[in-house]
Image (cartoon, rainbow, N blue to C red):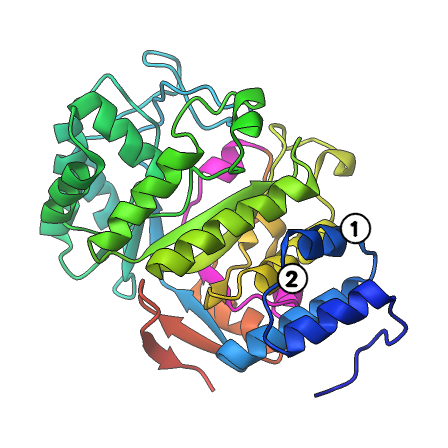
Amino acid sequence: MSTLITPQTDARMANIIDKVRGGERLNLEDGVYLYGSNDLLTIGQLANEVNQRKNGNKVYFIENMSLYFTNVCEAHCAFCNFRKDDGEEGAYTLSGQEMVDYVKQHIHPGVREFHIVGGHNDKVPFQYYVDSLKALNEAFPQVTLKAYTAAEIDFFTRISGLSIREVLEELRAAGLQSLTGGGAEILSDQYRKKMRVNKANVEEYLEVHRTAHQLGMKTHTTMLYGSIESHEDRVRHMLQIRDLQDETNGFMVFIPLSMQPKNKNAGIMRRNSAYEDLKTIAISRLMLDNFDHIKAYFINIGAQLTQVALSFGASDVHGTILKERISHAAGALTPEGLTREELIWLVKGAGKVPVERDTFYNEIKVYE
C-alpha cells in the first residue's frame, strides 16, 4: 500500500487510516472527526484507495434524459426554486402525450434512461402519474424508466389511499424500473421542520426504499448538504442509509448533492466551497462501505471539480442529462448537460477508464 501524501497525522487520523485499510467500519465519531479535519489530502487518498478496491480505475456514466412532467407542488421546501403553485405564472403539468412529443424532439439513439421527477401536484389524481409512465413506456420501450423520489411515492399514497407497496406495484405495471434518489435532503426530522420539508419524513423516506428493495427494485439515494445541518447531521444521514443497505442491499449509488443558492448571482460565500464538496464526497466513500458507487454530480459541483472528485472516491459522473431544471431553477451555474464525448473526455482527463453503463450498472461499453 502506498504511503500517505501527508504522513504527519495525529493519533486519531492514524487510527482511522488503520481502520480503513483493515476493512473496519467507521463510526459516527470517526465521520465527525473527518469533517473537522483539515487534512483533505489524507481523507481523499483513503477514499481513493477504497474506491480503487471496489472499482479499479473504472468510472461510470449513462446516456440519459431528465424529464419533468409538472412543477406544481403542494410542498414549500425552503431550498426549492423549482416549484410553482397551480395557476401561478410558469406553472405547468404535461400530459403523457405532450411528454412523448417533447422526447421525440430531443431524444437520440443512445439514450438508455429517463430520469423523471417533479412536483407533488395534488390537482391531478394518482392515475395521472401512472398514465404518464405508461405513455413513455409504450412510446420508448427500450428506455429504462427511473422515476419519482421516495417523497413522491409517499405523496402518491396520500392522494390514492393505497399503501407504499400497492403504489409501487401499480407504477411497476406501468413501466417503472427504479426510483430516483431525491427527497432525502438531510435525514433529520429537526432539519426537515426548520427547512419546511413538509413531505415524507425520515422514516417514510426509508420505508419507501425498503419496500422497493423488498419488491426487487434497485434504487438510488441522495444527501442535500450545505445549508443549516451540522457535520454530525450529515454523518447520521449516511449511517441511516448504511443501515438500510445492510438490511436490503438495494441501493446502487449514493449521491451527495451540493446545495445551490436560489439566485444565480449569489456570491461565493452563499455556495459550498470546492474543499467542502470534495471532503463530503470522500467521507461518503469512507462511511458507506456497503455501497459500490459514490456519484460526483457535475450539475451541482461543476465539470472540473467532478474530474478532481474521481481521485477522492467518486466512481460515477451521472450522465448526459440533456436539460436539468431543478438545480438550475435555483442558482446552479454549471452546464445543463454534457455529451457522451465530453463525459469520456472528462473521465480520461482524470487518468480513469470511462465505462458507459445502463441504469443498473451493467457495462455497455468500456472506452479504453
- State the image coordinates of residue 28 (x, y, percent, origin top left): 64, 51
Identify the residue at image location x=17%, y=28%: 126
- State the image coordinates of residue 240 (x, y, percent, origin top left): 49, 47
Quadrant in which the N terminus appears: bottom right
Q: Residue furthest right?
A: 8
Is residue 142 toward the left or the right of residue 186 in the image? Answer: left
Identify the residue at image location x=49%, y=78%: 55
Bounds of the magenta span? 307-330
Task: Compare residues 208 and 27 and report the one nearer the observer.
Answer: 27
Q: Say if the magenta span includes residue 320.
A: yes
Which corner quadrant of the image does residue 194 belong to? top right
The residue pinned by badge 1 equals 36
- For label 1, the crowd category at 10 Å Cα-Cα, with few meaning under 14, some 14 to 19 and many 20 or more, is few
Among the two numbered marks 1 and 2 on one chain, the one whose residue lies closer to the N terminus: 1
> Can the viewer see residue 74?
yes
Disc 2 is placed on an element classified as: helix
Task: Compare residues 268 and 227 and report the one nearer the observer.
Answer: 227
Of badges 1 and 2, the one in the foreground is 1
Task: Compare residues 36 and 141 and report the one nearer the observer.
Answer: 36
- State the image coordinates of residue 273 (x, y, percent, origin top left): 74, 47
Q: Amino acid at mark 2?
A: Ala
The residue pinned by badge 2 equals 282
Residue 167 higher or lower than 121, as above or below: below
Is residue 48 toward the left or the right of residue 183 in the image? Answer: right
Is the C-beta separation of discs 1 and 2 under 8 Å?
no
Q: Say if the magenta span includes residue 181.
A: no
